[in-house]
Image (cartoon, rainbow, N blue to C red):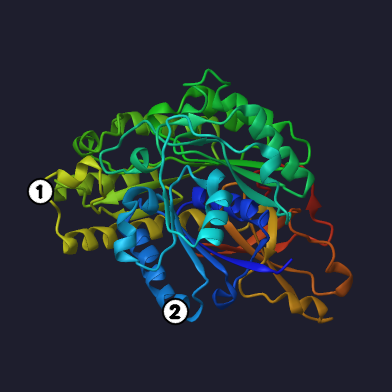
Amino acid sequence: MVNKYLYLNTIGCQMNVYDSEQIAMRLARLGYQQTSALEMADLVIVNTCTIRAKAEQKAFSFLGRLARLKKKKPGLITGVGGCVAQQEGEKIFKRIPYLDLVFGTQAINRLPELIQKIETKRCRIVDIAIDDKPEFAEAHSIVRQNSQMSRFVTIMRGCDNFCSYCVVPYVRGRETSRHPDVVINEIQELSQAGLKEVTLLGQNVNSYGKKEGLCSFTELLFRVRNIEQLLRIRFTTSHPKDLDDDLINAFRTNDKLCNHIHLPVQSGSNRVLKRMNRKYSKELYLDKVAKLRDTCPDIAITSDIIVGFPGESNAEFDETLDLIQTIEFDGLFAFMYSDRPNAPAAKFDQKVSEQQKKDRLQNLLERQEKLTRMKNQALVGNIMPILAEGFSKKQSSGNLNHPHQAVQWTGRTSTNKIVNFYQADSPENCGEITPGKLVLIKIEKAYSHSLWGEPVDSKSLVEGLKGEESYAA
């Protein structure tokens, strides 16, 4: 069989990472193996995101650069999938005339047949059919060929919340949950291949299973907890209005559930929240945060903020700053509002100027950076279990062959903080730390976006610790 090569460019959210894995697995059945060299590709697919304008612009910028490659290799097949494809459909052909395939968020299962048709008939195809009850792949069909210690697993798709700024319900469809047995089977297969940490994905995991009468999300977490080889469980994203006491209590009772929750608040103004159709108040959000911290004092809370939503006044932006100061988030993902096609807010008046949005974003990020550094600084001197992920970005694996060269690793705390550390520099210790091992690290330094530490001793490997128990140095 002649080798065929797939270049897969994933843009945007964690769900796209999971979807791209499914794309690669399905196309492997047609003989396509992934390559990181664009020039080698026989098939190029861009998996897109349209949640924010910047991600959409990035996708079209990459597609525009394919013109030269397509001219050089006329037989090259080019496709675009994901949310931009779902949103724009056939209109993309007018903007990118050398494109062969446009496939939507629910067409991944049909992708092999679409590619085969293009290979044989050299035709152009658009498939953006969307169903309120999309077909989910069975677990056995998406077993990964290359084992990894940490993976995303989608447990539900779509959304029923219809926040006024968001396009997800329009490009990913209505909320649908996968059956828990399918989810568990998939994670079990992955754990047998080396998985140690799983992140469960959904637009609103707190409402998992409710429409279908399945188990609750908290019950699913405990089923995942019973997978023996697994060390850690994470999830994203939680909608504040659906965060219940059962899930909050799981941070105390589920020993594999990491002490971190991403709980998007979006604004500190009740008027803005109402215009966003978020269906909760600032007071309710603060109450949820208080319950989380009462139940799990070490929990790290991160959030999303949108600045410059239509009609947001200076005073309402100040309310958001006050909320950030009150809660003291461990980290924030903050964005300037941008109109998105089909989202109701695109038609709202009282638009905030681009300069005002930039100024507000800078103000907010500077304030949050101080809080994050303060939170990180408080950890200096503590001994914490870190799940080793691999070599840090600055580390070359070639150093393992150097007899006196320390090896720099990276990993995360249970609270999702990045920790870089050196392995002992003697060659006999080089085999002790491997991806997926829990290592006890004493935190020595704190930075804005990471921590630095040292292994407590050469026998610091531990098994089965939940992860944010700190020990006095």
As rendered, which of 8 and 311 lies closer to the eye?
A: 8
Number of disc labels: 2
Q: Which mark is residue 350?
A: 1
> Toward which corner of the image does residue 125 lie, by quadrant?
bottom left
> Among all residues in the image, which is located at the extreme right?
428
Q: Position of residue 368 (x, y in %)?
A: 37, 56
Q: Is residue 329 left or right of residue 54?
A: right
> Toward which corner of the image does residue 428 lie, by quadrant?
bottom right
Nearer to us of marks 1 and 2 is 2
Position of residue 468 relative to residue 279, above or below, is below
- Residue at figure coordinates x 48%, y 53% from the top left: 375
- Residue at figure coordinates x 51%, y 28% from the top left: 208
Q: Bin the neighbour count of mark 1 within 10 Å (Cα to Cα): few under 14, some 14-19, many 20 and up.
A: few
Looking at the rendered structure, the secondary structure element under dot 2 is helix
> Among all residues in the image, which is located at the extreme top?
213
As rendered, which of 189 and 458 lies closer to the eye?
A: 189
Instruction: Report which residue position mark 2 lands on.
Output: 71
Looking at the rendered structure, the secondary structure element under dot 1 is loop
Q: Is residue 424 left or right of residue 216?
A: right
